[in-house]
Image (cartoon, helix red, strand yellow):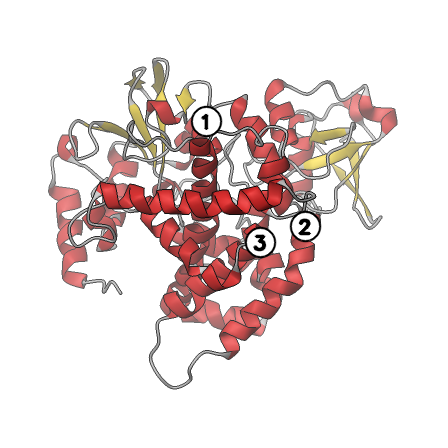
């Protein structure tokens, strides 16, 4: 299975496997990765799975939808490379992707 | 204080299951007063999860009672409008003769712009600044409680603490803080004989007094350099500084009620919950780290806001039912939070639940509670 690495705000890295077709949020929650809440279960409706995508992967993860843009605009500490990771679907092309979690989701 | 009568609860349970389905009307204030609404929603979730009530004191309305259907309505703001001119966000229609426009009762894009002005106050950085103050005040309130005698927890703790917090957020004159409590209560009450206010006129007069008081604060702040309190943020915010007086009052009421009523309910609900589930309280006492999950669990179990309302602006089919443009649609958060299909053993308070933040109490989508960061996290404990 492809792998994804979440790096916490304090620098701690967590590398977990994610099945193709699953979202990064699902992989994080199922593997108890701290810093990703995913309160809405992947509906793009709570903005609690906010991550910063490392530059090398930015072009590969696809663009934000209008809904994601709106929800992100209500999140704290967003940057140009912010995404809601429930909207990033795992695939072989994303094997090895690295994302960073913010200071807090709430 | 309300005393829950077990007879009333049993009688309501009996009615909940014996009333013909077509006549079932869950939006009955007395049911909630008696804590007897649970059986109504249990039956609706089982037999008619998207239910139409033809006639009630609030007119005809749809009841959405299951978690996933509520999520579908809440996240579809294009079909399900919050607009105050269509009736707003409460089952009781917004009065046309006393409109209170507020961003929670607006749709994008105006909603998004106004919301963004106030959201920084509950951003993690700002909450961290307030944390010490909140802790000290909570300690003072708790240390000052009488021992070995009966007292009113709601007044001495729930109201006092939330009102102090609100006064801090607004930088509101501290000695006048109970005015905030009063205005919050008046804003949400239904006027009537023996009620909090006797008439709609009295209600509006008190809210105008609120507007006048805040207008004074606005004038002070608008002429001073920007600070981090809410009034200053509104007075200086790009999207809010040109609000009409009615819009200003509307958004103030929203912030007062949003910061007052709901938190009061969960602070009170926590004590009630622990009295019903003493073993959970023991669990928490033995391991205070469980506060991280206990707080959202209480917010789910108690559900500070029982419902939110939308108005359909297009015909839509949901769960096999045909909702028409113009229909009033009630999302019963209080029911969705007890939906056994999504939440295991939902009637139990479990302080170490695996996914405690999976609940509807903050809503979902663009109107998700702006204060969810301040309430749902242990920063506020």
Q: How many marks?
A: 3
- Quadrant containing the N terminus of chain B in the rendered view: bottom left
Q: Is residue B235 visible?
A: yes
User: In the rendered structure, the residue with mark 1 lies on which chain?
Assistant: B
Distance (Cα) linking label 3 and label 2: 14 Å
User: In the rendered structure, the residue with mark 3 lies on which chain?
Assistant: B
Q: Determine the image quadrant of residue B99.
A: top left
Using a 10 Å C-alpha cutoff, classify the residue at mark 2 as few (fewer than 14 neighbours), some (14 to 19) or many (20 or more): few
Query: B243 left or right of B147?
Result: right
Residue at mark 1: B106
In the image, B62 versus B139, the foreground residue is: B139
Q: Which mark is residue B171?
A: 3
Distance (Cα) linking label 1 and label 2: 26 Å
Earlier residue among tags 3 and 1: 1
Query: B229 left or right of B362?
Result: right
In the image, B223 versus A36, the foreground residue is: B223
């Amino acid at each position: 299975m492809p792998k994804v690495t979440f790096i916490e705000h304090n620098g701690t890295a967590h590398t977990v496997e994610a099945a193709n077709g699953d979202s990064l949020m699902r992989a994080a929650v199922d593997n108890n990765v701290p810093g990703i809440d995913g309160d809405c279960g992947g509906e793009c409706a709570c903005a609690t799975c906010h991550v910063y995508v490392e530059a090398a992967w930015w072009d590969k993860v696809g663009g934000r939808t209008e809904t994601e843009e709106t929800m992100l605009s209500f999140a704290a500490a967003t940057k140009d490379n912010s995404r809601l990771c429930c909207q990033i679907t795992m695939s072989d092309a994303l094997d090895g992707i690295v994302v960073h979690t913010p200071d807090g989701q709430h | 204080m309300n005393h829950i009568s077990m007879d009333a609860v049993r009688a309501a349970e009996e009615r909940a299951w014996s009333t013909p389905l077509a006549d079932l009307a869950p939006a009955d204030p007395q049911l909630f007063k008696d804590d007897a609404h649970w059986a109504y929603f249990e039956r609706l979730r089982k037999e008619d999860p998207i239910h139409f009530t033809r006639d009630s004191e609030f007119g005809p309305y749809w009841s959405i009672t299951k978690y996933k259907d509520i999520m579908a309505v809440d996240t579809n703001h294009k079909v399900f409008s919050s607009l105050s001119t269509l009736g707003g966000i409460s089952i009781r229609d917004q009065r046309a003769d006393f409109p209170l426009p507020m961003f929670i009762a607006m749709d994008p894009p105006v909603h998004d712009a106004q919301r963004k002005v106030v959201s920084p106050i509950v951003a993690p950085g700002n909450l961290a600044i307030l944390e010490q103050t909140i802790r000290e005040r909570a300690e003072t309130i708790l240390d000052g409680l009488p021992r070995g005698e009966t007292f009113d927890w709601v007044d001495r703790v729930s109201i006092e603490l939330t009102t102090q917090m609100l006064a801090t957020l607004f930088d509101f004159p501290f000695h006048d803080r109970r005015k905030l409590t009063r205005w919050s209560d008046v804003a949400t009450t239904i006027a009537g004989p023996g009620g909090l206010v006797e008439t709609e006129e009295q209600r509006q007069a008190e809210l105008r007094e609120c507007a006048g008081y805040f207008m004074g604060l606005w004038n002070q702040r608008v002429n001073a350099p920007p600070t981090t309190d809410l009034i200053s943020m509104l007075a200086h915010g790009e999207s809010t500084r040109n609000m009409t007086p009615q819009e200003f009052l509307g958004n103030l009421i929203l912030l007062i009620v949003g910061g007052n009523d709901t938190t009061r309910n969960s602070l009170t609900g926590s004590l009630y919950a622990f009295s019903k589930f003493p073993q959970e309280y023991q669990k928490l006492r033995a391991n205070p780290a469980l506060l991280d999950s206990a707080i959202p669990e209480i917010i789910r179990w108690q559900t500070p806001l029982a419902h939110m309302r939308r108005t359909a602006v297009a015909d839509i089919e949901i769960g096999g039912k045909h909702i028409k443009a113009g229909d009033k649609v009630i999302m019963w958060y209080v029911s969705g939070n007890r939906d056994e299909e999504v939440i295991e053993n939902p009637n139990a308070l479990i302080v170490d639940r695996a996914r405690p933040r999976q609940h509807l109490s903050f809503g979902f989508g663009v109107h998700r509670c702006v204060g969810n960061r301040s309430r749902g996290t242990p920063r506020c404990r």
